[in-house]
Image: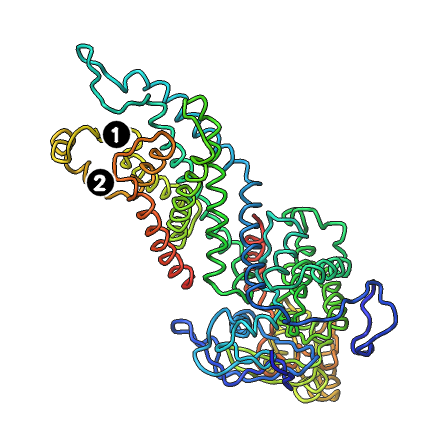
Amino acid sequence: MAAGSRGEAPVEAPEPLPVAATPVRRGDRPPVAVWLGGLGAIWLREIKRALRDRGQFIGGVSRPLLWVIILGVGLNPYFRGEIYGEVRFVVPYTYLQFIFPAVIALNIMYTSVQSAVSVIWDREFGFLREVLVSPLPRWLVLLGKVLGGTTVAMIHGALVLALARFANVPITPTKLVQGFGVMFLLAFSLTCVGVVIANRLRSFEGFGVFSNAVILPLYFTSASVFPLNPALTRAQTRVVYPEWLVTIVEWNPITYAVDSLRGIFIGFNQFDPRIGPVVLAVAAVVFFALALRDFRRA
Amino acid sequence: MPEHEPKDMITVRDVSKRYGRTLALDGVSLEVGHGERYALLGPNGAGKTTLIHIVCTIHPADSGTVTVAGWDVHRQPRRARQALGVVFQEPSLDTRLTVGENLEFHGRVFGVPRQLRRRRIAELLELVELAEWRDKLVATLSKGMQRRLEIARALVHDAQVLVLDEPTVGLDAQTRARMWDYIAEVQRRHELTVLVTTHYIEEVDDCDRVCIIDHGRVLAIDTPEALKASHGRTLVRVKARDEVAAGRLLAAYPDGTSANGTIVVPVDTTASVTEILRTFGNELEAITVESPTLESVFLSLTGRAIRDPAAEAEATGRRGARGRR
């Protein structure tokens, strides 16, 4: 199709063009509809990109297998030591059952923090500009991205549920609904943490190293792989375990996420079951605010 | 939206912008009229991209005001953005999405209703000849195709002003020519105002008006013809037989410049050409006379050629590196 000379066509050109030009329409939709549509588009893009990333998916599948089957099965016999016929630990669960909710949290942690890599990606490969010249407000762009990362992380968390039967954790619809609620809050907060990290880093490699350096310590100090003995009083706990470890575990927000998931899936809580959701909801709000502050500056 | 028919689609008034110690823009003012194709011409680093970023609401100006379609870009950036279609110098497509998905994303983010979005996307893909590529990942497209896709994308939301920052950089000559055909065609069909930057001087001849900018200052604004008439000079390109002859020639014409063995001497009358021939005729290998071009306009306004080969190589190299995944 050859370019016609400019300015010769009148406004209501009746002559057929090779392709009919659809009449121009500008700004006749309510802003809320536009915002929801834009939010959906940003969310959908994150999901599509993540689902096309084979590496991320492989990680999401292999991690739970490793943790549940190798570590869980391997440590299972050592979890309940018996001395002179007396059960030493009072946690009335197998190690597989005990670690199962924590592995859900681990898979969510990895995926949600990693999903923030797309923030670096957008900046490096120019796509950020496309979003910045769009009429959407910044907070909505960030919300779309975070919700996208949250959804992907929840999918990865749900992958772990496939191992429930193997770990001898019965799943009921009620447990699923409550579990997804906690998983959402955890994934949302951690995706925001990922964005905060991503906004401070310039390279993908740096992000990989840094995210590992954040995720693993948080995971190990969240009472995920070992319980703080619930039979002991607070004072006794501090005698049995080094004080610094107890303090870290108690201050680590992930502890409460893991505790909530445990309460829901195997009915075991080390802390008041009401604390978990509150801590997570506060974390979600605080970290979103922090992420937004950084994202506005980007 | 209120009844909003501004006379000028883009107005830039006394805009300055400083990056650290560099004054990137120094009191720039210009107006782009409705339906105009307006070129910003200047060498790399002249401040073109800085100005484009301010017009596109990406960076704020230090001082001065800018309006797009009557909306102040600082006070009503979202309104201005709705009126703008932007093709940045650096690629800004998501290469992991398909061609169609990139357009779909844009349409949704700009709030184009579904029906209209579908029709418009099909139409634009047809226009930039990418209809068969709709379901291919953008990563598999050539650079030229990606640029075309970016032009199409900028129009999905019925932009009134199309801004293109160096749309032809990094493309081969044939693709560059074709790119201008597409720009002309979309401008005709969508009744667009087009603001385009380039440092390829031969590309601005078809524009309605040209603004020559260098070191952050506006040097001249006019139609290409008027610029040629007022600032253009006839250029005599001479290839001297040896170094000595070249030296004598440059001594006789101090405003001549020498590059790659060719000496370019701006002259005002054809009488000067005769004079060169009479004095140096025996010492020349070749001589060409060029009637006034925009290149000579630029030369006489800035005292240097627009294209600095080293800077250009660097710019294309950078773009290439970023374009790859």
> Counting residues from the N terminus, which is met first, the one under dot 2 or under dot 1?
1
Q: Position of residue B174 (x, y in %)?
A: 75, 60
How far across and how far down the image is residue A265, in percent? Answer: 38, 32
Residue type at the position of mark 1: Pro
Position of residue B243 relative to residue A101, above or below, is: below
| Quadrant in which the C terminus of chain A appears | bottom left
> Please, which chain is the residue tagged with disc 1 on?
A
Residue most extreme to the top: A84
Secondary element under disc 1, as helix, strand or loop, is loop
Q: Residues within 10 Å of mark 2 (few under 14, many from 20)?
A: some
Q: Disc 1 marks which residue?
A: A227
Residue type at tag 2? Ile
Which residue is pictured at 41% across the width and 23% down the height? Answer: A167
Left or right: residue A206 compared with residue B160:
left
Of B218 and B30, the residue lying toward us: B30
Q: Does residue A240 lie above or below B240 as drawn? A: above
Q: Are marks 2 and 1 in contact (CB under 8 Å)?
A: no
The answer to whether dots 2 and 1 both sit on one chain is yes
Chain of the residue that carries numbered disc 2 in the rendered image: A
Residue under numbered circle 2:
A248
Query: Which residue sits at x=59%, y=68%?
Result: A30
Quarter occupied by the N terminus of chain A: bottom right
Q: Classify 10 Å Cα crowding around label 1: few (below 14), some (14-19), many (20 and above).
A: few
Image quadrant of residue B304? bottom right
Q: Is residue A65 left or right of residue A255?
A: right
Question: Gap in Å between the C-alphas at discs 2 and 1?
Answer: 13 Å
Label annotation for residue B242: none
